[in-house]
Amino acid sequence: MLPFYHSVTHKCGLLKKPPRALIKIKIINRCNRKILCPCTQTSPNPYHLIKLLTGNTRQANILLKSLSANGRPFMENILKGKRILIVDDEADILETLKELLDMCLIDTAPNFEAAQKFLNKNTYHVAILDIMGVRGYDLLKLANEKAVPTLMLTAHALSPDNLVKSIKGGAQAYVPKDKISDIHIFLTDILQDREKGMEKRGTWFARLKPFFDKKFGAGWRKQHKEFWKQFDETYRVSKDEIEKLM
């Protein structure tokens, strides 16, 4: 992971030499351990890591947006003009998502109360909800009542239990903030499925399963064996589809 960010930050011309933060991360990561933020000693998501390296919020957003294309053009056709509600108690995350989804019409809310007012007042094509700090599951319930498809985007509530709880609660996808740069891909999947009259599909999970396997460890689905059996049967993704996704 570190060489990836190191090479990208230098290739884009934002950095002429490694800053102190990068040197510190190198030292921490010397034994090939998980990258830790020198300030918080926790694993930063891509946005926070890039911001740490550049020291500049706007540069971090520009760089992250260039990375999010992932060698492919943005899915702007289906996303353009779509109205999206984003709820998160971190201002940096709200700003980053607005930058990444600048082809959409965005409303942002930093807490449950503001989000509740937006959902009661407006109609949205999709909602992106944090879980911790904004009463994400209560908002998910409200979004379901309003027939608004929902993507749960989380870092602190990243666990097998919360994944299952989100899908059982009606979310269309459960995405870690580590994958924030691919948010347009997950939203496109949701909106395309809705246009085809399909409530849910397993595409998002097929994209993220390798990440979850690495993050949660071997056998992480055994705890909710019946749920995953039903999920796999209902939202099966073919081998050809998986190969296209990867």
Image (spheres, rainbow, N blue to C red):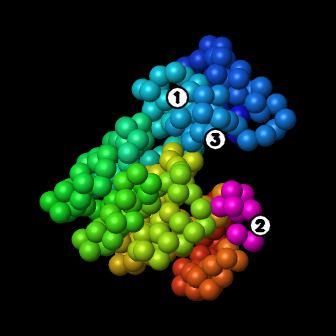
What residue sits right under mark 1 in the picture?
A: 51
Q: Give the range drawn in magenta.
A: 212-220
Q: Distance between the residues labelled 2 and 3?
A: 21 Å
Q: Earlier in the sequence, mark 3 or mark 1?
A: 3
Position of 103 relative to 202 (above/below): above
Residue 53 lies, in percent from the top left, at 59, 25
What residue sits right under mark 3 in the picture?
A: 43
Dots 1 and 2: beta carbons under 8 Å? no
Q: How crowded is mark 3: few (under 14 residues within 10 Å), some or many (20 or more)?
A: some
Residue 94 lies, in percent from the top left, at 37, 42
Q: How far apart are marks 1 and 2 (CA)?
A: 32 Å
What residue sits right under mark 2 in the picture?
A: 218
Q: Residue at (26%, 74%) from the top-left corner?
A: 145
Residue 212 tag number: none
User: 28 or 191: which is nearer to us?
Assistant: 28
Q: Residue at (47%, 38%) from the top-left corner?
A: 65
The answer to which quarter of the image holds residue 213 is bottom right
Q: Which amino acid does label 3 sit on?
A: Ser
